[in-house]
Amino acid sequence: MRDTVLDPATQARRRAAETADAATHRAGDLIHLNTAGAGLMPDAVRRAMTEHIELEAALGCYEAEELRGEVLREEVYRRLARVLEAPEQDIALFDSATRAWCAVVLRLPLRPGDRVWTTPYEYAGNLVSLLSLRARTGCRIEVVPTRPDGDLDLEWMARHISDSVALVSVPHVPTGCGIVNPVEEIGRLLAPYRCVYAVDACQSVGQLPVSVARIGCHVLTGAGRKFLRGPRGTGFAYVARRVRESLVPEFHDLHVARVDSPSSYRVEDDTARSLELAERNLAAVAGLDAALEVFETGTPFAHREVFDALCAAVAQTPGVEVIRPGTTHSGIVTFRHADVPPEVVVRRLAAERINVWRILGHHTPLYMAERGVETAVRASAHYYNTPDEIAVFGRALRSAVAP
């Protein structure tokens, strides 16, 4: 991980802002190690959402939207574009990352025999979309192999890439384990070819630097609720113009479409917003904007020591198997115990006010389920966690699995 180099005064201001935020984001002595599920909302996000709902109650929903139009229709897109280092006109908002993914991938104009590359780390929800795409188009799905250490085999990709590959889907960080896939290197490898390169950044945006410009992808999707600490019901996509122009025509909502006659309509907006629906939860959009502001004014990538401490705390626990493929890792650690079931570990830690999560192997079926991992425990740290909290977690985990 890397952090932007800032002058000392700016660093001090940002640390002070993060300290104030961290002091108010949790109840009592809660240790939240489930940001991979959903991050803890900053006070600023709750305030933004509450204020918008109060405006709707006081003025009316449409009137509140008009009053906050700059934030809801412009500012949130600008912020997200800066975070992703992407053109603003290529950003669209959705109510989930899955909705964002389906709005694009299911409409790709693939042909019979086109090859689609996925990886063993693909999220099951994305696989469902790929299988639906195969049923509609007759494309072929191929799984990129991994090396013995768990890293994706980039040499295999280099040997087998050609213009018969129409789509390559790669999760930056999988939901079931903490490997960081080399999405920028893959982007450079794929650049000379015609394929659409799609990156699922659900578990990376907010905990790792994510730059569409450096990755070189054509589609990137993510969720607001995880490491960006926004509200549930928020997702987004970057969709390059060439991909938008190629999509199989589908419904266009009335924020971008105008019906000219009983037999025709035209689309008046050619940006990525043409993929959105007109109706949306504007309190959630306001909350996402506030979360992006918190993110932009913080230093979310300067906490590598917490991630390393989390992995060490798990690895040093007797009887624990760490499920950690690959050579580059994020702040997500997945594990299981030889004798204590994951649901028991989660329950015992919850009794100590420590949040972790029980994951299901079939949610990452090409890696977890094929290795016999039906369930496991996932712990995920973020910048609001501290080394002292990880030490408390380590002691509690050892107690939770003790005979």
Image (cartoon, helix red, strand yellow):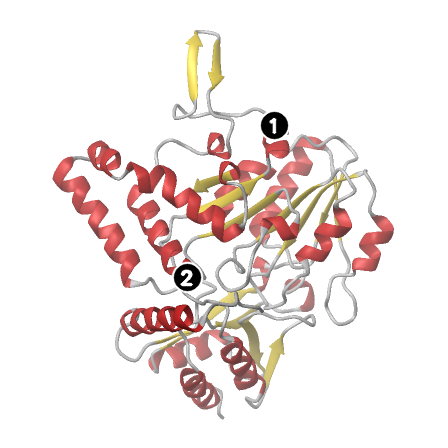
Which of pointers 2 and 1 indicates the residue nearer the eye? 1
User: On screen, 8 above or below 266?
Assistant: below
User: On screen, 320 above or below 213?
Assistant: below
Residue 394 visible in the picture: yes
Pointer 1 local density, CA inside 10 Å: few below 14, some 14–19, many at least 20: few
Image quarter in which the N terminus is found: bottom right
Secondary structure under the numbered disc 1 in the rendered image: helix
Residue 107 visible in the picture: no
- Name the quadrant containing residue 318: bottom right
Q: Position of residue 350 (x, y in %)?
A: 37, 77
Secondary structure under the numbered disc 2 in the rendered image: loop
Q: Residue at x 68, y 56 (%)?
A: 184
Q: Which residue is nearer to you in this view: 75 or 31?
A: 75
Q: Residue at x 51, y 26 (%)?
A: 270
Pointer 2 local density, CA inside 10 Å: few below 14, some 14–19, many at least 20: many
Identify the mark nearer the N-term, 2 or 1: 2
Outermost residue toward the bottom in this view: 403
Give the residue type at disc 2: Ala
Q: Which residue is nearer to you in this view: 13 or 79?
A: 13
- In the shown orientation, is residue 148 left or right of residue 245? right
Q: Cα distance, mark 2 to mark 1?
A: 33 Å
Q: Residue at x 26, y 73 (%)?
A: 27
Numbered label attached to residue 245: 1
Q: Position of residue 241 (x, y in %)?
A: 59, 33
Q: Which residue is nearer to you in this view: 171 or 125?
A: 171
Outermost residue toward the left in this view: 58
- In the shown orientation, is residue 403 left or right of residue 327? left
- Name the quadrant containing residue 95: top left
Q: Residue at x 40, y 83 (%)?
A: 389
Give the residue type at disc 1: Glu
Residue for badge 2: 38
Q: Position of residue 229 (x, y in %)?
A: 39, 60
